[in-house]
Amino acid sequence: MVAAAVGRGVSAGDLATFAGTPLEKTESFRPVSEAALAAAAAKLRAALGPLETLLARSPSGADWKNYLDWTALQAQAAGGMAADPATLRRLQKLLDAGENGLEMHQFAAVRRAVAAYAEAAEAAKSPDAAATYAQRLDKLAAAVAAGAAAGTTEALEPVGPLLAKLVDSGQAAATVARVRNAVDRPNLYLDVDESLLGSAVNRVVDEHSPINDTVLGTRVRGTGHTQGFVLLDFVPALDRAIVDIALDATNHSDTRGSKGPVTVHTLGTTKVDARKRIVIDDERVTALPVEARASTSTQTAGIGVNSRFGKNFIRKMATRKISEMRPQAEAISERKARERVRHQFDTQTAGAIAKAQSDYQSRFRRPLMERGWYPEMLHLNTTDATLSVVARKSLSDQIAAFTPPPAVDPDAVMAARVHETLVNNTAEITLGGRTITQEFVEEQIRKNNVALPEALGNETDQPPWSITFAKQKPVELDADDGRVKVTVRGTKFTSGEREFPAMDIWAAYRIEPADGKIRLVRDGDVQIYPPGFVPGGGEKLTVAETSLRRILQKRFGKVFKEVVDVEPLKMPGQLEAAGPLPMEQLVARKDGWVAAGWRKKDPAVPASGPTLAALAP
């Protein structure tokens, strides 16, 4: 399986070229135009709209507006050259404070718009703007060189914020574009084999049905036997995913038609095929009308004559008449079969397609948008055998992948290749600065009707807990060669009435094969230390920090287990019969990529599908 290489037209060596060739600083500082300031003001107005809608629904909306100095926000958004950098920075601080709720993406969008507007206003009005620009270019060149030499996300961390500031202040467009090309590649690849999705659709058709019809004024009765297949078929497409549900069947009919004294026994064969095309892009699932074809051939198996006189003459005349009318009768049968299969196939697939269309919006697009998770780039495509999804999630001050992903295991029926920036960027959007309480977690678990994980529950003698996540890198995935490390950063913890200072909690795992499976083996104990603390460096923990470590060790020791056996992947809905899928590939690389591949269930269990009515001529 090979996903389309979708990005910004970047070659694999772009970042590497910065290691030997420093970033050239050839672009001079450019004064910011009135049009640029007007555009920044317009972006702020656009960001204020969704936030105002949110606050209008909230009982505390008026208090939020008062806190945010809504009048000043609106005044700045209406500005342009009248923008006041000092006011904008004051408003930015209000939006960047530690108030719970400010982490919601509507607030975050306004905060980013205010910060961008302030950068533009300072570049237009500050006497130090040119010097600030030169310093930023120096920092960018150093960060890019360090990242290119190290080949790690950590070394490239300063790049995203610097690029955002240059863009917001309208500077160094060519330099920004070149660096973006190297560090803003897709950070998610998902590949699904046709056979996996086909397990929910593919089936044998073997149906008997009665026939009761009228052809050219003759009543026809009998039976029909339809045999064939319904198959899912990927259609190659570069700019979307195209999936056909196809019927390929043959109906054998055995009928008798009577008119007057004559009864004709007819054997018929009708070849039918139908195709329902489904098109999936980043916005919607679209179903096209069913295309159907039919081809009928008949033969007379016998002619009966119910008459006392002239049987041979009547049989002779009937034989000639049947021969003359056969082409017309077959054409009528073909048309009826075509319309019947079109209607039946459309009816049979309508429910599943309508659900897919609804789920795509309600379970995919809308939730991602509401949470601020929707990718900045999302691309779907199909080959003869594979449906691929390629995405990039990175805001203007974040970076994404900077190298191509690992190869997909050729035996995998489903593969996911995730760069650590996807996890880290999304976590920062979702959790940065947010306070999560035990009560909130339990409420969400009840809403979703799932069992409370042991690690999140409390023993009866323990008070309720809460954690306030750090604004930057609240949860971080760090991939290395054959290893992964997960870090949770909290700026504040509570246990009942007790409040504790900031702590970083992390655990590192080795990826190891085990009895034909894959498992994660923890390296040592869960590590819990204050930010910046160097174990063994001579510094000692305070009494409060030591007390918090004991509490967190007990809880996060359950979260980060010593050994995690990777269980086969259960499949949802109609794909359940295809699973569970055993994992056969789990690879982690120093450049931040983690690749996972799942093989077919062994032994395979055939999936069942809805019954398709027999298609008689």
Image (spheres, rainbow, N blue to C red):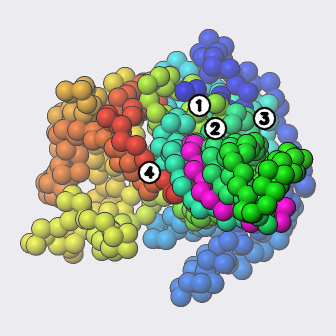
Which is more N-terminal, label 3 or label 1?
3
Which element type, helix, strand or loop, lies under badge 2? strand
Q: Residue at x 39, y 32 (%)?
A: 599
On the picture, is 217 further left or further right than 487? right
Which is more N-terminal, label 2 or label 3?
3
Which of the two residues, 503 or 230, is positioned nearer the viewer here?
A: 230
Which element type, helix, strand or loop, lies under badge 3? loop
Which is more N-terminal, label 2 or label 1?
2
Label 2–label 4 contact, CB within 8 A: no
Mark 1 burial class by Cα count in 10 Å: few <14, some 14-19, many 20+? some
Mark-to-mark CA distance, 3 and 2: 44 Å
Q: Which residue is mark 4?
A: 608
Residue type at numbered disc 1: Ala
Q: Which residue is mark 1?
A: 385
Residue 572 higher or lower than 485, as above or below: below
The furthest residue to the left: 461
